[in-house]
Image: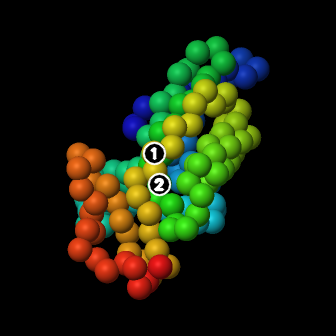
Amino acid sequence: MSSSKNNNLNGGVIHISEDVIVELARKTIQGIPNIKIPERLSAKFGIGRKSDGIRVSVNADSVPSIAVEASVLVKYGERIPDLAWDVQEKIKDNLERYTGYEVKAVNVNVQGIYTNTGDVFQVDLSGDDIANPDADYQDEM
């Protein structure tokens, strides 16, 4: 994500890095109650990109546009479609407000749920298993 994109204003050029857009989306998600960004094992050890869980694509046409893909965890007991819609709307509103770019799409991937005790039940990357199948979560919810 080292590339930057252009926006012509009054004869000048403004570059907004994709990393900046990822960080704006991350901060937006962190401000939404009952939603978390999943931590990848590589991120816990400081390996890989800080943007795990959020990807952006910027189209730098005459009217720049953004597409976002965000992976999230939802708190157990909450209505998933409502929270996913909130994530979409808030990311769209904030990115359009802070960048001036048009947001074409915000795709939200709900990868799992978490509980008040901190347990996370997350589908692995292959989609075959739940990451914590042996946990006794009945008592904690």
The answer to which of 130 and 24 lies nearer the viewer is 130
Percent across and percent down for residue 47 are 25, 58
Residue highlighted by disc 2: 72
User: Taking 88 as reference, is 135 left or right?
Assistant: left
Give the quadrant of the N terminus: top left
Whether the residues at callouts 2 and 1 have beta carbons within 8 Å, the answer is yes
The answer to which of 86 and 69 lies nearer the viewer is 86
Residue 18 seen in this snapshot: no
Residue 116, placed above or below residue 20:
below
- Examine the image and state in which quarter residue 16 appears: top right
Mark 1 packing: few (<14 Cα in 10 Å), some, or many (20+)? some
Rendered residue at 50%/68% (across/down): 76
Residue highlighted by disc 1: 109
User: Which element is circle 2 on?
Assistant: strand
Q: Is tag 2's residue or tag 1's residue first in the polypeptide sequence? A: 2
Rendered residue at 60%/58% (across/down): 79
Q: Amino acid at mark 2?
A: Val
